[in-house]
Image (cartoon, rainbow, N blue to C red):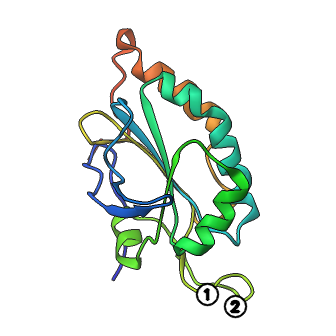
Amino acid sequence: MTATKPKAGDKFPAMRLAKLGGGETDLAKPSGGHDWRLVVVYRGKHCPLCTRYLTTLNEHLADFNALGVDVIAASADPEEKAAVQIGDIKPDYDVAYGLSIEQMHALGVYISDPRSAAETDRPFAEPGLFVINAEGDIQIADISNAPFARPDLGSILKGLAFIRDPKNAYPIRGTHA
């Protein structure tokens, strides 16, 4: 099976995942009264760069929420590993776990095999960031094949402030066929 990269303007795939703390979530559906959603796909517990990125994401959370953007992070880690890493971060956003290979393909993220058993014990998703608008369409997509190539969250925040300002009427970019 090969991944199909999602296109700007496409519907974000419906995808249910378990959440740390209990329950399930649909990655495409914002919560908390927000109408947009930021989905951050991260590599997992074995990745110290992910821990820093998720910590920075938490620092920007109030600003994303003020723009009407709900935030969620997701990885392929099992619950136990996700709980350890996220327990160190203590984010105020939801964290989903257990992305399957099929779900990673549906998201179009790169998938890596562990370099050794010391790294992790299963294939994992490389970083991805998706902004889903109120219609459930992909407004922004950033997919990387390396842990050190991720969008700056401050830039994403500034861009979303511009996009969400009605006077700008900013369209989804990258849709020319």
User: Height in image: 161 above or below 129?
Assistant: above
How many numbered callouts? 2
Residue 142 on image: x %, y %: 50, 50
Tell me the amino acid under the disc marked 2: Ala
Question: Which mark identifies residue 36?
Answer: none
Quadrant of the rendered structure where residue 34 is?
Answer: top left
Identify the secondary structure beneath mark 1. Answer: loop
Given residues 25 and 138, the one toward you in this image is 25
Given residues 137 and 98, the one toward you in this image is 98
Give the residue displayed 62% in from the left and 46% down from the top.
91
Q: State yes or no: discs 1 and 2 in contact (Cβ < 8 Å).
A: yes
Hey, which residue is sitting farthest bottom in the picture?
A: 117
Residue 162 on image: x %, y %: 48, 19
Residue linked to disc 1: 121
Whether residue 152 is visible: no
User: Height in image: 44 above or below 115?
Assistant: above
Residue linked to disc 2: 117
User: Height in image: 29 above or below 165?
Assistant: below
Give the residue displayed 58% in from the left and 66% down from the top.
145
CA gap between label 1 and label 2 equals 6 Å
Give the residue displayed 33% in from the left and 31% down from the top.
35
Q: Is residue 47 left or right of residue 67?
A: right
Give the residue displayed 28% in from the left and 42% down from the top.
137
Identify the secondary structure beneath mark 2. Answer: loop
